Amino acid sequence: MKIKVFYNKSCNICKTEIDHYKGLENKDISWVDIVNNKSAQKITSKSYQELIRRLHIIKENKVISGSKAFLEIWKRIPRYRFLYNLFKLKFFYVFLFVFYEIAAFLLFIKNKKLLKRNE
């Protein structure tokens, strides 16, 4: 089952990580840059600010955001399936969730200039 990943290509950290995943060639994942992409907003029903704030995926016509989106990506990449198996456990998922939310907030603050470009 294919998923669509919506990510911020203008964020150097986000781009580097996603480019790494893209290099691992997984046909079950399609990648969509959200910067100034009105169709990404329409497809996800998310505002531009929401798309910049967190990673999003669409799986079975459902939007999944943040740390849960990473679980879906890792589940489909054999090299990272161990992360999926570890962090799907509730005890470890709490750590992933907290770490992701802090990192995503700091990256959002760093990339907030993108909101002005879209106005």
Image (cartoon, helix red, strand yellow):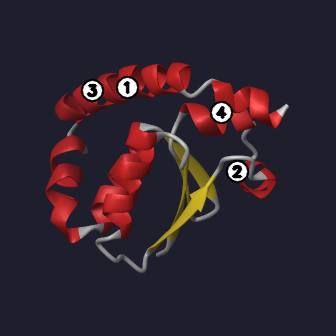
Q: Is residue 97 above or below residue 69?
A: above
Sequence-first tag of 2 and 1: 2
Q: CA distance from mark 4 to mark 3?
A: 22 Å
Sequence-first tag of 3 and 1: 3
Q: Secondary structure at mark 4?
A: helix
Which residue is drawn at the image coordinates 56% and 28% (left, top)?
Answer: 111
Q: Dot 1 surroundings within 10 Å: few (below 14), some, or many (20 or more)?
A: few
Q: CA distance from mark 4 to mark 1?
A: 15 Å
Sequence-first tag of 4 and 1: 4
Read off the residue under disc 2: 44
Look at label 2 and name its amino acid: Thr
* Circle 2 or circle 1, nearest the eye: 1
Instruction: Specify the quadrant of the image occupied by residue 82.
Output: bottom left
Read off the residue under disc 4: 50
* Circle 2 or circle 4, nearest the eye: 4
Q: CA distance from mark 2 to mark 1?
A: 22 Å
Q: Secondary structure at mark 1?
A: helix
Q: Dot 4 surroundings within 10 Å: few (below 14), some, or many (20 or more)?
A: some
Look at label 3 and name its amino acid: Val
Residues at circles 4 and 1 in contact by the CB criterion of under 8 Å: no
Q: Nearer the viewer, residue 10 or 69?
A: 10
